[in-house]
Image: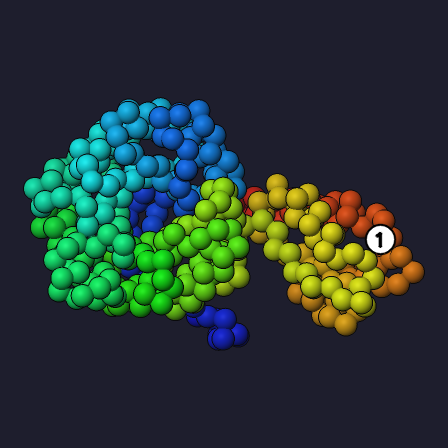
Amino acid sequence: MSHNPVRPWRSIDRRPSRRIMVGSVPVGGGAPISVQTMTNTLTTDVAGTVAQVLAAAEAGADIVRVSTPDEESTRALRDIVRESPVPIVADIHFHYRRAIEAAEAGAACLRINPGNIGSAERVREVVKAARDHGCSMRIGVNAGSLERHLLERYGEPCPEAMVQSGLDHIKMLQDEDFHEFKISVKASDVFLAAAAYQQLADVTDAPIHLGITEAGGLMSGTVKSAIGLGNLLWMGIGDTIRVSLSADPVEEVKVGFEILKALGLRHRGVNIISCPSCARQGFDVIKTVEALEKRLSHIKTPMSLSIIGCVVNGPGEALMTDVGFTGGGAGHGMVYLAGKQSHRMDNDRMIDHIVEQVEAKAAEIESARAMSAQAAE
């Protein structure tokens, strides 16, 4: 993100990195930070897995990872890749032959774990398959599966051990003159992951995949991921992210985008700014926001909407949003458009009316964008 001379306190200077391609998606080198998730169906259930991939893509996922634990899964991967609208990453553990089969099946990227993929000779065979089939790779270091010699050397999983594991594997790929790789150093401990990623960012120019692994359920995992990933992204570290939740993959995508939106790094859909509500509210803020989140989930255009219960902060927040509604009295409130007071609206009609206003604004933004693109041609 470029330096902001007007509001320097909002600037995030992203770490320079090489650019690679994961299928059609650029990662690193200043490309937009991509959002990933992973299916949790049996990969051999092609229909079920494809359904999850499609749902994740509709929610905004740029890349989807699929586990390939056995030969039946890599056979199924071919059909999944054919049906997927986004690049598919094959998740490989223990069996290097699964990586070769996944490359042959059309995977856009192979995720391999240095701690369990095997010898340098096996890595060499995986690299050859990746090169032959146009795959990129991800070196996926995990605190829970570090190589034994590193645990013996360092005594326990620590940032230094994780980074050393990654560097050792980078050398294996570079010795084969293979450079289409990204790298991650994940841990479930936020402090460990953050420290490892900071050290990693200083010693390689490879694109970095961010994640707090095994973060937990929807609520606890979201909080841990927001803290860990949010701080790293704020420091400019990270080219692609995955929020790991014990939840529907669609929820991972939603949380990932919310983290990026909060930092101004990427925008998709309606950013709703709403108050927690109190005794001053002129309407039921919580139920209204819940309804609007559902009613506006189809909007992909980046835009902002403020829903504030009273006039203490409502007018000020509305000044900075595309559409706003501030509670008043006597059963009605004020609608704001482009930061200015527009008209009053009865509370019992406000949800439908706000949806109409947001849809109209989204159409206006998309029309202006299309005209600008035509003028640039």
For residue 165, side relative to residue 263 (left or right): left
Determine the residue positioned at 41% across, 61% down. 229
Look at the numbered disc 1 and give the secondary structure of its residue: helix
Q: Is residue 112 above or below residue 215?
A: above
Between 188 and 316, which is closer to the camera in this rendering? Answer: 188
Q: Observer-nearest residue: 79 or 247?
A: 247
Identified at 25% across, 66% down, the residue is 159
Horizontal and vertical percent position of residue 219: 53, 55
- Residue receiving disc 1: 347
Q: Quadrant of the N terminus?
A: bottom left
Task: Tell me: residue 97, above or below residue 209.
Answer: above
The residue closer to the viewer here, 377 or 330, is 330
Picture quadrant where residue 90 is located: top left
Residue 203 visible to an observer of this rendering: no
Specify how the rendered protein is coloured: rainbow
Q: Residue furthest right?
A: 330
Could you tell me how many numbered marks the image carries? 1
The residue sitting at 42% across, 55% down in the picture is: 215
Relative placement, left or right, of 15 versus 365 is left
Q: Quadrant of residue 331?
A: bottom right
Compare residues 241 and 280 and report the one nearer the observer. Answer: 280
Determine if residue 10 is in view: yes
User: Where does residue 68 sit, x and y in percent of width and height?
Assistant: 29, 34
Quadrant in the rendering for residue 343 = bottom right
Specify whether 168 is left or right of 313.
left
For the point 21% across and 66% down, which residue is it?
160
> How far from the left and from the top, in percent, is residue 126?
16, 38
